[in-house]
Image (tube, rainbow, N blue to C red):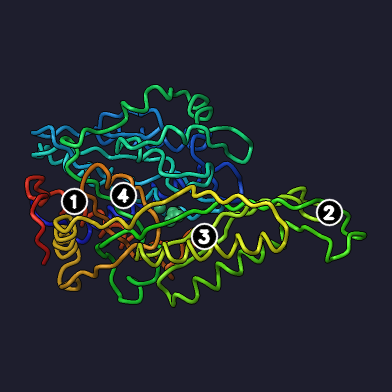
Amino acid sequence: MPALTQSEIDALGARAELMVNSLGTVSAEPDRLVRLFLTPEHRRAADRVTSWMRQVGLAVSEDALGTVRGRLEGASPKRLLIGSHIDTVINAGMYDGPFGVIAGVLAVEHFVRAGRKLPFGIDVLAFGDEEGSRFPATLASSSACAGVFKTDNLKLADRAGVTLGDAIAAYGKSVDDIPAAAYRPDEAAAYLEVHIEQGPVLEVRNQPLGVVTAIIGQTYLNVEFLGEAGHAGTVPMLLRRDALAGAAEAMMLGERLARETRGEVVATVGRMTVAPGATNVIPANVVIVFDIRSGSEAARARLVDALRGGIRALAERRHLGLTITTTREVATTPCHPYVQDQLAEAIRSAVGDAAEKPLRLGSGAGHDGQAMAKLCPVGMLFVRCRGGVSHNPMEYANPRDLGLAVAALIAFIERFDPTKLTSRTTT
Ligand code: GLV
Ligand code: MN
Ligand code: MN
């Protein structure tokens, strides 16, 4: 098929923006975007995605984890999986996740409209658990599709004490159907995700699109300190067992250790619970969660070891009870060389001469591709976002760039040949 014209690309971008804005209104709260896994808002967003998929002529189904699948049959049983997520962080931007699903829908629509049967099928997937904002573990939906769902995670509870197993039932699904969500490895040719970069590299390099080389590895450490509640006015400082002071020291240690790696490892504590949580009571029980990431498995492991050791020592010195649990451990996930090369070609075709040599970059953010890589080769296309800002309501991507991303996805689908996936050549 001939390449898309600039006005066709702009029209795709404008439609993508409208759809992103439409999903951006589906929130648990009126003044900020909050859409957590298996909630009524997830349901409403899934329904909206379902209606878009039906409008473009896809056959839609939903699995036990609520993943929406829009299916286009091809000439062979092989299928290209194109997806992203429709859950959000708390106080989110509108692009992180939804745009990848929307790009898939718009790209597939292009082929449906042309009335062309592709040599392989396409499933567009809208996952619901990429952010991990509700339960302590994440990627439940993509893990189910990849056939690596951990049944133990069904017991994990959200802040209100609702377990994942109960939430699945409340969403109208059955945990017994989780195995049926898995693709067979021989049917899944590859998984591809379009996503905003969530960082500043493309903008700084003046490129609308880039090819992801790998998704960096991640460890979550759940650290619980047990002290003793007491009167904030009467207990002398030296006699206290203050769980929050211990947590604060642990956080400072994590920051120092990460800084010492000079950019190789990043460590964040973005979540803490303090009990009993009263101004005039010494904190008795504090839980913090470390999110530790690095492109180097060795550097991440070294930091985790040093942090665990340091926290054990400070808890002992402060006479605090301590439990450290690893709730997430994901290795760095390389993107497949063939998929990378085809994405680079697709960017060249969509963007033209300005992208002579498309930029290749790593992803510091986590993605469903980390789970899908257990099933099949994965690849990702990044789209420039303003200021590199993400996980923030200010998140924004220009509709022109959104249009180029959909055009590149269409060009990728045009070129994609599942039989080439075993060849490991890179340009
Ligand atoms: C998800 O966006 C993550 O990287 O945590
Ligand atoms: Mn995301
Ligand atoms: Mn995110």
* Secondary structure of the residue carrying numbered label 3: loop
In primary-sequence order, the first of circles 4 and 3 is 4
Res 269 quadrant in image: bottom right
| Mark in the foreground, 4 or 2 | 2
Say whether residue 344 is left or right of residue 132: left
Tags 3 and 1 in contact by the CB under 8 Å rule?
A: no
Residue pointed to by mark 4: 369
In primary-sequence order, the first of circles 2 and 3 is 2
| Mark in the foreground, 4 or 3 | 4
| Mark in the foreground, 3 or 1 | 3
- In the rendering, which numbered label is found on residue 392? 3
Question: CA separation, marks 4 and 3?
Answer: 22 Å
Question: Looking at mark 4, is its residue's CB closer than 8 Å to ligand 2?
Answer: no
Q: Position of residue 98 (x, y in %)?
A: 39, 48
Question: Looking at mark 1, is its residue's CB closer than 8 Å to ligand 2?
Answer: no
Toward the viewer: 201 or 184?
A: 184
Q: Residues within 10 Å of mark 2 (few under 14, many from 20)?
A: some
Q: Position of residue 343 (x, y in %)?
A: 18, 58
Residue pointed to by mark 1: 410
Q: Residues within 10 Å of mark 4 (few under 14, many from 20)?
A: many
Question: CA separation, marks 4 and 1?
Answer: 19 Å
Say whether residue 42 is left or right of residue 141: right
| Circle 1: residue type | Ile
Question: CA separation, marks 3 and 1?
Answer: 29 Å
Residue pointed to by mark 2: 281
Question: Looking at mark 3, is its residue's CB closer than 8 Å to ligand 3?
Answer: no
In primary-sequence order, the first of circles 4 and 2 is 2
**Which residue is drawn at the image coordinates 8% and 54% (left, top)?**
423
